[in-house]
Image (cartoon, grey):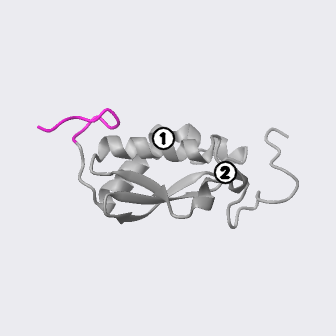
Amino acid sequence: PGPCSAGGGGEDLVLTEENVETVLADAKGTLSTMFGNSLENREVGITGDVEFVDIDGPTVILALRGRFWHKREDVLARVSSFLQERIPEIMSVEVEDPGMLLEENNDFEPGDPMAGGSGAGAGW
């Protein structure tokens, strides 16, 4: 028996693409209020998603897509912490493109019918 991690209630995992994708899916469920993975969130224009891109040594590279409730840097920090708790080999988590952390990009998602136009009327 190895050490249990606070983030997932199980054994620490090794750094593989499959494990990163599994833990990322768990993070989306556990941290669901940050993402657009519920009908309620999508109805008010929250379409945010974090996608696995690559592993580069001990670094995991992710992409942020869509609109989030929280600041994009906070989303990355929470997801990073979740991944590192479950997969201790991860030394850092980065985004594919630094522009993905800019708040002005929180309104844009390629192909999103809600992007652009005259505002995201949450509630109206």
Which quadrant is the N terminus positioned in? top left
Q: Which residue does the numbered mark 2 point to in the structure image? A: 67
Q: Which residues are magenta?
A: 1-11
Q: In this view, which residue lies farthest toward the right?
A: 118
Q: Position of residue 108 (x, y in %)?
A: 71, 59
Q: Position of residue 22 (x, y in %)?
A: 35, 53
Residue at disc 1, secondary structure: helix
For the point 33% across and 62% down, the residue is 17
Q: From the viewer's perspective, is 89 left or right of 110?
A: left
For the point 65% across and 43% down, the residue is 41
Mark 2 packing: few (<14 Cα in 10 Å), some, or many (20+)?
A: many
**Nearer-N-terminus badge (2/1):** 2
Instruction: Check residue 9 for magenta coloring.
Output: yes
Q: From the viewer's perspective, is 103 left or right of 57?
A: right
Q: Amino acid at mark 1?
A: Arg
**Mark identifier at residue 78:** 1
**Mark identifier at residue 121:** none
